[in-house]
Image (cartoon, helix red, strand yellow):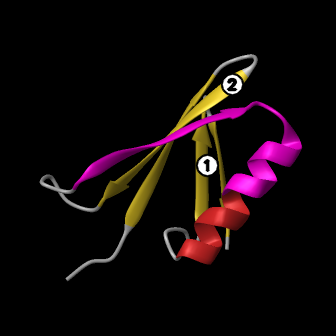
Amino acid sequence: MSTAKFIGLDVHNETIAVAVADDGRSGEIRFHGTIPNTPDAIRRLVSHLLRSGELTAIWVHGRGWALSLH
């Protein structure tokens, strides 16, 4: 059984909407909330997700670039 989770970020100038999805086609999708689009708020979000066990690695993909953080 897979334990992968996916974090979705809908980024806007002032805010970021955050969702967490379980792995697989039938995985549950949960709206986590909306945070300010600031470095401090993003740090707090990542810290929270790491402490809760929902996040163990970060893989970011944007227009023509990708970054993996472990």
User: Which numbered circle lies on residue 60?
Assistant: 1
Identify the amino acid type marked 1. Answer: Val
Q: Residues within 10 Å of mark 2 (few under 14, many from 20)?
A: some
Q: Determine whether the residue tagged by mark 2 lies in a helix, strand or loop.
A: strand
Nearest the eye: 70 or 31 = 31
Task: Please determine whether, in this image, residue 49 is positioned above or below residue 65.
Answer: below
Q: Is residue 69 magenta?
A: no
> Mark 2 against mark 1, which lies toward the viewer?
2
Residue 5 in the image: state x and y as whole percent.
39, 63
Q: How many marks?
A: 2
Tell me the residue at 35%/47% (across/down).
Answer: 30
Label 2, on which residue?
15
Part of the protein shown in magenta: 28-45
Quadrant for the N terminus, please.
bottom left
Left or right position of 33 against 28 = right
Q: Residue lying farthest front?
A: 33
